[in-house]
Image: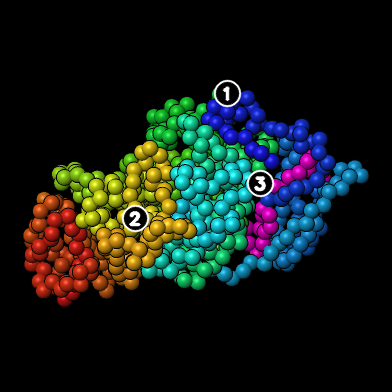
């Protein structure tokens, strides 16, 4: 089947003309049957014994259903506007045995049947969570490494293209390529892998300003229960997770609840008009977070922000529809149980409906108490950021999300690396942001970062200054929270988003056949790249082995003259981080740090392995952060 290229104008026209509303007629003319059931299978022994099945097929919603299986009770069948859908509410008793049962639909003399399987839960590791003891590495699968060239492209998909010479098309990176480099991550000191979305994005190429673009990024789902076969499919993902777990690494899955791709199978034939948010004319979200937290906000602004579409190619799901909400929540549970993921990163978190997100988070945490959840809320101040995690501020809509991505500290650290020191400038910004941690119930659960797939690359932002690079990485790996690193930062990958996001999503050198350089090996890296790699490796490895550094208390002192000092400590060890953010060497007197230095007389420089025989004063080179293990 040949799919059309979709332009923004055409996509907006789809929404305006209502072609997305329902396409009942064409389906109703087909012979009745059940073509799919979601979730595709389930398990016995889940804590929540309720399950809602989406049953789909021509006229499947016009039948009366029965189930006969010990321990399984069909509580209710729901019909919706579209006769091709039925939603079945099931109760699965704790005593139910694994096995398959028949779902039978009857309408007069007509009969439909479909088998459904209840599996036994496995004891494989799952939902281990990530904590401040971890170091997360963010990978964009299509751009990292190609482990299986045979799955680069398929003729039966809407986008049949793959061309590494074109920055906007798929390049062929896949899950096998990531698995092939687990030793690389292990050497670097990584303990958790966060993959940009791996769920099927069977989207047509889109024409954006005359440039044809693919959905290689993964944020436009078209079938929740299929890992994209160009990435290797469900089996490849399961094998990666098993292999990572065998090495003691965890997997973070990138979840998208707010929207799907315009080519999603249930968008082509929607269950009801209110399955997605719709307006009289196409309406994009404003991307302005203020109406969500503003007590003075106009309802109109809130509606556009929350219900507007993220792009013309990504319909905005209506999570107030109970069937939509159940579908998304059950898929999340299914994913953790089936694949064994350890944590969730939630895309576009603040665009989701608050009650839905709290319900979804709680469903996951009830089933998997150690699971960590951290969402993307791209805001510019601490109060707003605390609104999207467990906050000590009494917001009207309290969030139960355990963590969030720390965009505010990200901004502060980047400003500190690019601004001269001042009362409110430079490293003062880092100090001021951390000084407001009281707004969070647990700031250690925030995920910190220096850049990601949506941003200018860190090394470029700091002017390709290796001293600044090391200073920022030191803060990332020694301050509170759960640090994450964007792929390639350790080998000084660079670029700005201008003219497009593709510039900051370039292929990892050495991950693809024909690459002239292989940056996965020290021999393939130049001297400067090896210096950066070894710096991250040494500090990340030290951090992994020192509980005081990754999980201890934090005490910081007010910066003076561009010097910023903080301590990480527990009952067994104290680490001092002393930063000189200026462009001149400084001699720092340490008497004002007496409450933490009390009893310590010397130190070991963790990064240089040098010994400091006294702590009365210390010389700190320009643009340098020292990491000192204090000794008595």
Give the residue furthest to the right. Answer: 109
From the image, which quarter does the N terminus lie in?
A: top right
Q: Which residue is mark 2?
A: 489
Q: Residue at x 8, y 64 (%)?
A: 617
Q: Which residue is mark 3?
A: 156
Can you give x and y, in whole percent of width and height, for residue 24 in the image?
Answer: 74, 33
Comparing 602 with 492, the one in front is 492
In the figure, is residue 16 to the left or right of 541?
Answer: right
Give the crowd class for mark 1: few <14, some 14-19, many >=20 residues within 10 Å: few
Q: Earlier in the sequence, mark 1 or mark 2?
A: 1
What residue span does the magenta drawing correspond to? 39-64
Q: Which residue is mark 1?
A: 280
In the figure, is residue 110 to the left or right of 240?
Answer: right
| SS at circle 2 | helix
Q: Is residue 232 above or below residue 167?
A: below
Comparing 48 with 458, the one in front is 458
Give the crowd class for mark 3: few <14, some 14-19, many >=20 residues within 10 Å: few
């Amino acid at each position: 089947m040949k799919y059309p290229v979709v332009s923004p104008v055409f996509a907006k026209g789809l929404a305006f003309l209502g072609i997305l509303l329902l396409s009942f007629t064409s389906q109703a003319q087909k012979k009745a049957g059940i073509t799919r059931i979601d979730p595709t299978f389930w398990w016995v022994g889940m804590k929540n014994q309720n399950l809602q099945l989406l049953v789909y097929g021509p006229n499947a919603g016009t039948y009366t259903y029965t189930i006969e299986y010990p321990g399984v009770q069909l509580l209710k069948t729901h019909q919706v506007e579209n006769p091709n859908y039925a939603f079945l509410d099931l109760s699965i008793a704790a005593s139910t045995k694994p096995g398959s049962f028949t779902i039978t639909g009857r309408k007069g003399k007509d009969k439909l049947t479909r088998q459904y399987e209840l599996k036994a839960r496995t004891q494989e590791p799952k939902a281990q969570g990530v904590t401040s003891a971890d170091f997360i590495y963010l990978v964009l699968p299509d751009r990292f490494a190609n482990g299986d060239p045979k799955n680069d492209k398929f003729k039966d998909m809407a986008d049949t293209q793959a061309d590494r010479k074109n920055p906007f098309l798929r390049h062929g990176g896949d899950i096998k390529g990531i698995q092939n480099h687990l030793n690389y991550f292990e050497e670097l000191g990584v303990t958790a892998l966060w993959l940009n979305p791996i769920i099927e994005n069977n989207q047509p190429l889109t024409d954006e300003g005359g440039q044809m673009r693919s959905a290689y990024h993964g944020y436009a789902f078209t079938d929740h229960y299929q890992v994209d076969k160009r990435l290797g499919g469900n089996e490849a993902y399961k094998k990666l997770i098993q292999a990572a777990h065998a090495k003691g690494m965890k997997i973070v899955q990138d979840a998208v609840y707010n929207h799907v791709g315009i080519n999603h199978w249930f968008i082509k034939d929607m269950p009801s008009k209110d399955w997605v948010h719709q307006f009289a004319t196409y309406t994009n979200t404003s991307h302005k977070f203020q109406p969500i937290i503003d007590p003075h906000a106009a309802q109109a602004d809130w509606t556009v922000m929350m219900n507007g579409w993220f792009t013309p190619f990504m319909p905005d799901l209506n999570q107030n529809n109970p069937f939509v909400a159940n579908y998304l929540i059950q898929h999340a549970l299914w994913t953790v149980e089936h694949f064994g993921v350890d944590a969730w990163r939630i895309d576009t978190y603040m665009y989701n409906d608050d009650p839905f997100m709290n319900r979804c988070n709680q469903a996951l945490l009830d089933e998997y108490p150690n699971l960590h959840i951290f969402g993307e809320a791209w805001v510019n101040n601490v109060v707003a950021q605390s609104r999207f995690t467990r906050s000590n501020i009494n917001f009207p809509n309290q969030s139960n999300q355990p963590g969030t991505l720390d965009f505010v500290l990200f901004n502060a650290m980047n400003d500190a690396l690019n601004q001269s020191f001042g009362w409110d400038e430079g490293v003062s910004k880092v100090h001021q942001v951390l000084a407001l941690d009281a707004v969070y119930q647990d700031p250690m659960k925030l995920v910190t970062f220096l850049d990601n797939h949506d941003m200018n690359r860190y090394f470029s932002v700091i002017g390709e200054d290796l001293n600044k690079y090391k200073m920022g990485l030191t803060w990332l790996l020694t301050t509170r929270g759960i640090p994450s690193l964007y792929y390639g930062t350790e080998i000084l990958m660079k670029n700005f988003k201008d003219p497009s996001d593709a510039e900051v999503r370039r292929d990892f050198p050495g991950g693809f056949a024909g690459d002239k350089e292989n940056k996965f090996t020290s021999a393939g890296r130049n001297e400067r790249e090896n210096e950066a790699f070894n710096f991250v490796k040494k500090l990340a490895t030290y951090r992994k082995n020192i509980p005081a550094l990754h999980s201890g208390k934090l005490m910081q002192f007010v910066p003076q003259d561009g010097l910023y000092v903080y301590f990480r400590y527990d009952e067994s060890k104290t680490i001092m981080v002393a930063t000189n953010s200026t462009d001149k060497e400084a001699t720092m007197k340490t008497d004002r740090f007496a409450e933490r230095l009390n009893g310590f007389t010397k130190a070991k420089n963790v990064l240089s392995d040098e010994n400091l025989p006294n702590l009365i004063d210390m010389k700190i080179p320009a643009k340098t952060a020292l990491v000192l293990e204090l000794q008595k």
